[in-house]
Structures are given as C-alpha cells and as structure tokens.
Image (spheres, rainbow, N blue to C red):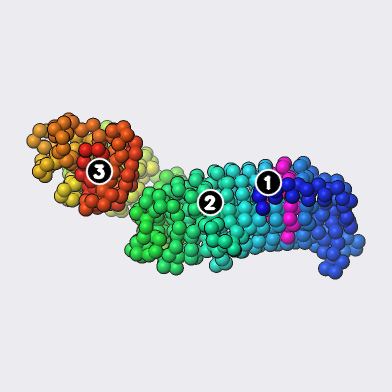
Amino acid sequence: MSNKYLRAMLSLVGLLAFSSVFAYDVERDGIYYTLNTTNQTLTVVAGDTKYSGDVVIPDEVQFSARALPVVGISTQAFYQCTELTSVIIGDNVTEIGGSAFSGCTALTTAVFGDAVTTIGFSAFNGCSKLKDLTIGDAVTTINSYAFNQCSSLEEVTLPGKLTTLGSHAFYGCTKLKKVTILDSENTLSFDNSNQFLGCSALEEVYLGRNITWNSTGTGSLAYAFANCTTLKTITIGELVTEVKCFTGCENITSVVSNITDPSQCPTITVPTKVYASAILTVPNGTTGQYVATGDWSKFLNIEEASPAVPVYTLSITGNVGGSVAFGDAVVQDTTQEFEVQEGNEVSLIITPDDGYLLESVTVNGTDRMADVTGGVLNLGQLAENTGVVISFAEDNSPIDDGKHSLTVVCYPNGQVFFGEESVSGETKVFRVEDNASATLRVVPALGYRIALVLLNDVEITDMLVNGSYTIRRVRSDMTFEVEFEEDPATLTISMADRGAVTMDALSGSTYDFTITAAPDWVIHSVTFDGEDITASVDSEGRITTPVVTGDAVLNIAFERIGEPTMAKGIAANTMRVWATGTTLHIDNAPQGEQVEVFTADGVRIRCLAGSSVQTELPKGEVYIIKCGDKMVKIAI
C-alpha cells in the first residue's frame, strides 16, 4: 500500500469517526470514559468536545461508589485534537489505541505511565510539534507508523522490554538526531522495515541488543536505518549477536563495540566505505579477536577503549576552628565530597585558625592524629570510599611573636625563588614573621624536572601548583628541600626506506642528522612533530632538529626521480606529502589527478581526489603515494 493511499484511508476513517455520535458512559473533569462492566475498568474515548490544552489521564476515576482504574486509551480518542498541547498518561493505562493521538498538531509533550505495554498503529501520526517524548519502561510493542512524521522529535530512547517495532514507526522524523535502544537480553523484532527511514538528521545510534526482522521478503531486511546519510556514530551493546540494519549509511565515522567476545556477533553489515574509513573501538585487550572474526576483520582502523579506572568518594569534614585543603578546594566548617581515581595520591593540608589547634583526625573512624606531620596528612592511594573528619580546639597556649627560620635547600639543576631571592645548588635560611604566609616557586633547569619536594621531611611534590607552594602560616621553624632529575624523552626517526628508530633524548637539546636517500630517490619532505622543516636540510642532507621538549617524531619522506623536471630535489616539489601520527596529509596535488596510496608491496589501499586531502593509515608501515608521474615514499 502506498503512503499516499494510506494517508487517504486514515483521513477517511477519521472523518467517518467524527461524523458519528460518540458513545461514552461517564465524563469526569473534561475526560470521557467507557465502562467495562466485566472487569470494572475504564477506557478513555472521544466525547462531545474535542480535548485541548494540557491533559492528565488519572490512575483511577470515581464511578458511583467505587474508584475504577483507567486502563486504556481507545482508538482515535484524541484524533485531530489540534489544540491539545500535552498529555500525561496514568500508571494504570496499559494500551494506547490506534490513531489515538493522530493529527494532534499542537502536542509538544507526551509522558507514558509505568504500565503502558502497547502503542497502537499510527498512534501519534502527524504530531509535528511533539518534542518531549518519554516512552515508559514497560512498553513491549510499538506498532507501525506509531510516530510517523513527528518532525520535531530530536531524541528517542526505546525501553529494555520492547520486543516489537513496527515498520515506519519513526518514518519522517526529520529532526531526530539520536536513537538509543536500551540493553536487554530480549531480541527486538522489526516488523517489515524502514523504521527510521527519512530521519535525515540522525547522527548517533546505540544498539543495545540483537535485532531480527519479521519481513516475508528478503530485500528489506537491512533497511531499519536505511540511507541515514548523516549518521556518524553507532554504539553496539555487549549482548548483540547480529548487526545488519545500516544499509546506505555511508558516512559513519565511529563504531564502538562493547562485545567482549566478537565470535558471538560475527556479522556487522555496513557500507564498504565504512570498513575502510571508520574507527572501530573495541574493549580493552580484544583487538586480536576482532581482527580474526567475521565482518569485524574488514575494519582497517581498530583501537581499544581505555580500561575503566575505579573512582572512590573522598568525604572531608572540617569542623569549626580551621581548614582542610585538598588540591584547590578548601573545606571549613562543612562536609564536601570529592571523586578520586584509583592510583592518585591523596594528601590533605590541615591549618588551624588563629587561636586554635588540631584536636583530632579520624579516617573511616580510625584515629590518624599521629600521621599528621607539619600540618600534612598523607592518605596515599585510596582503595575504597574514605571519610575523613578533622576537629579543632581552642589554643590557650601563649603565641611566640618572634620570627621563624625558613631553611631552603636547593640541589643543583634548578632554582627556588622566595620573593626576590633565589636559591640554586645551596642552602639558605630566611627569617619569616610569625603567622605570615610564604610562597616558594620551584624552577627546574632546561632538560630537568622536579624530582622531590619535602616540607619538614614530608613529601609534598604533588601539592605544587604550577611549580609553586604556599605555606599559609609559618608558626615554627621549617625546612623546604628540593631535588631535580633529568627529564628524559624519546626521539623517533621515521624513514620510509629504513623503518623507524627510537633513541633516548634529553629535553632542551637539539640533534644533528645526515639524511641519505637510496639510489633513484631524493628527499621529498622532513617534518618534526608535524612541523615542516624541509627548508632546514642543506645540500648535503644535513639537518639540525628544533629543541626537543618531550617525545618527538622526525619523519622523512622520499621522492622517486622521474622526468628531468622532477629530479631537482627538494626545491622542485609542489605536491607536499607528510604525516602526523597515523594521519597522511597531501597538499597541492595537481588538479584532475587522482592520488593513489599503495602498501610497500604494491597493494593499492586508497584512491583520493582533491588538491588537499588526508586519510588515516595503520601505523608501522611504509606507503607509496603516486600522483601522475610523481611517486613519494613515507613511513607512518
């Protein structure tokens, strides 16, 4: 049946229905009901006046001397109620009838109750302003055309109990951007196909379970998300066993699979372009299984998701009379909670207010007062949720108004600044007023980094903020000690005809190299961490790197000598080829010429068009780039 014929039939049915005399048994608060005398239940129906405004369908209605549950919304109950703006469905309603809200063109919000299991054929057809849709968790069946032409919907979440989704259920939802099919062990059965056909803005799909199709034919089995060309990301839940519903979705760039054993789901049917260009993200440690399994092996770009790091709750209670500093947060006369990842060191700086002193420290109910040194409580790495309670008491002891000694010990290869004074490779003693603050700034020498910082023999290295540490109140003699260490780095030299060599390097240094091309090849380009430094290569192939400030890559590409005009070396190159990480960049390719990418053994893997293009390639390989009579060799 054509869509045009279907719409005509629906309109005819509607006209016939509204030309009849409506039958109802009771009206309460502007809502009409029929009574099922056998079950003693009520169903919402159309009445003498069309519904409008905001409607709340109650859980039950007083009928004579009894409160009866409202269990259903009949066919066409709200049909073409064009002034209806919102509906909240009670928790006893189990079924929404066919065309129940069809043609409600002003309806913006629909909230389902906890008992709704079935949404009828064309139930919300043509609700063009419906934007806020909450489908209840109990829904098991959404029939065909249920939300057809709901062109304001932007996001849809299908519940875990859903087992049937009829054809064209969300057909023509032109603003729909995200579809989530929640995880479940149930198999979701698609009736015929084209559930999301015409969703021209769809960008993201979460597929939480296996999908089967009830179509009697075979040609439409893969058309659930047919030709959703704006779709960029699909995420596949752990329980899915087959994926073949993305026909024509050629612009998918990201496929995220949560399946830990890909052999349970060997079939994932997507356009060939997606296999070649999309990034497939798989669970940590499963790359080998995916490479060896079914359709997953067709993906050229596979990467693993980072393993989840446990996060614990750190609860800090700082009572009246002082403060507790954790990172940049200060807790005073309150309780605050923080999320701390496993593996992170936790230290608290405890500072009593003037006239107060530290009275007690408990961690998960255990006394830790003895572990506080120099006002610092080091909790180490958390392995569980941790509660810290710190109390203060009034200090009735006399305060010494004299100055205190601040001893700064700075080992070689760096400096410590205190005000305008600096300390380097020596020990200096400064006099500081009682209760004054003291800020010390640590600056490593070039090629070095901070190794250790101690305050009164307690390590506070991780407490430095941008290399600085502030003692909030100096109330006794204190010692600040700093050590430095070399800041190692690695420099990788990637050459197309020699592979890659990684060497130890020192931050702050430069390195000299002489580049020698193989016979019949000349230097094409040289990049340092993606920056073009080809012009720095002299006529003998010698080059000095920029200053190494961390791990770096020197990438060298070579060009095959061809025609005499191509044999002039670096200065003759107009087409530029270089790499950053696993991305191949090509600029200034000749107009009208295709750029072909081959593996080192001659297998063509890319054919690109355009003067400036880029593409992702597997790491650790040598590639040949050919454009016209120009041939460039580069390592990724």
**Within-10-Å neighbours for mark 2: few <14, some 14–19, many 20+:** many
Identify the residue under disc 2: 226
**Which residue is drawn at the image coordinates 26% and 48% (left, top)?**
598
Residue 301 percent location from the top left of the image:
35, 53
- Judging by the rendered image, the residue that carries numbered circle 1 is 4
Residue at the spot 23% in from the left edge and 51% down from the top edge: 602
Residue 206: image location, x then y, percent? 51, 55
Count of marks overlaid on the render? 3
Quadrant of residue 431 within the rendered picture? top left
Q: Which of marks 1 and 3 is in front?
A: 1
Kind of residue at badge 2: Ala
Name the one closer to the observer, 15 or 558.
Answer: 15
* Residue 110 among those drawn in magenta: yes
Residue type beneath disc 3: Ile
Residue picked out by circle 3:
625
Front in this rendered view, residue 47 or 407: 47
Determine the residue positioned at 45% across, 46% down.
Answer: 251
Which span of residues is magenta-colored? 95-112
Which mark sits nearer the N-terminus, 1 or 3? Answer: 1
Q: Which of marks 3 and 2 is nearer the N terminus?
A: 2
Marks 1 & 3, CB-CB < 8 Å contact: no
Q: Distance between the residues labelled 3 and 2?
A: 35 Å
Q: Position of residue 511 (x, y in %)?
A: 14, 41
Q: Identify the amino acid type marked 1.
A: Lys
Is-magenta flag for residue 316?
no
